[in-house]
Image: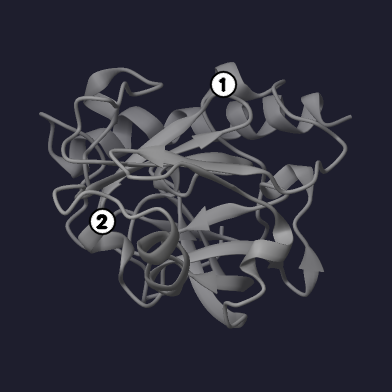
Amino acid sequence: MVKNNLLSPGQFAIDHFPRFGLTQYADKYSTQSSPLDILISGDVEDKIRLAEKDLDPLTRIEQTSDFHCVTTWTRQNLLWSGYRFKDFYQKIILPNVRPSNKANYVIFRSQDGFRSILPLSDLLADEVLLADRLDGEPLSAKHGAPLRLVTPAHYGYKSTKHLTTIEFWPDESKFHPPMYRFMSHPRARVEFEERGLWFPGWFLRYLYRPQIKSTIKLFEETMK
């Protein structure tokens, strides 16, 4: 454990960045990074598929930010490289996909079946990235290759890895959480400790924290 007084409520810092997630996804990954191929769909005029070259018009940025896992660990000062979701939306989605004016929610789907949802308004914050590099290196299978979402203001389960589909919808009805319903907050903002539904964030700390070591071990074993 690393002590730091600047951590968000209920979090503790660790000195490494483990592969982590719901245990049913531990063995669902590819050791080989596949070419970028993302379907953009939903309540839109035109569905399109995007390859890596289609992101070339966007400005690449680097960003240092913390990653807050809902189970209470935080890895600080990760250096991400990629593209602001805001730029992606304004320069690629609006002119080429033309989502409905009512499409205020975005669903992200992963190659392994995981998915997350966030309000479009949250995704247009400057620090939200579509990232393909971490700490100066291309993303590995461990951390979401070929492209992942990075949302520092939200708990890690919103930062979907191995992106394969991005959908724009007017509401949340098309989204079915990959976990128990109480574990999936619609926004999951770290600042407000929105770890899940129905229970206060401080309560969920004590439910999740005992599972950290065993989950890290399980995910490490599947990478061998």
Q: Which quadrant of the structure image shows residue 117?
A: top left
List x then y, in percent, for residue 177: 33, 24
Q: Which residue is drawn at 25% across and 56% down?
A: 120
Tell me which label, 2 or 1, sits earlier in the chain: 1
What's the residue type where badge 2 is placed?
Leu
- The residue indicated by pointer 1 is 23
Which residue is at the front of the view, 176 or 79?
Answer: 176
Give the spatial CA distance, label 2 vs label 1: 28 Å
Which residue is at the front of the view, 188 or 76?
Answer: 188
Q: Residue at x 86, y 35 (%)?
A: 31
Q: Which quadrant of the structure image shows residue 157?
A: top left
Instruction: Please indicate whether residue 33 sits to the left or right of residue 49 in the image.
Output: right
Which residue is at the front of the view, 76 or 153?
Answer: 153
The disc at residue 171 is none
Q: Is residue 42 above or below residue 119?
A: above
What's the residue type where badge 1 is placed?
Thr
Query: The residue tagged with tag 1: helix, strand or loop?
Result: helix
* Marks 2 & 1, CB-CB < 8 Å contact: no
Q: Which residue is drawn at 81% across and 41% down?
A: 34
Is there any visible trace of residue 71 in the rendered image? Answer: no
Query: The residue tagged with tag 2: helix, strand or loop?
Result: helix
Is there any visible trace of residue 45 in the rendered image? Answer: yes
- Is the residue marked by circle 1 packed among few (<14), some (14-19), or many (20+) residues within 10 Å? few
Which residue is at the front of the view, 138 or 206?
Answer: 138
- The residue indicated by pointer 2 is 120
- Is the residue marked by circle 2 packed among few (<14), some (14-19), or many (20+) residues within 10 Å? some
Mark closer to the observer (2, 1):
2
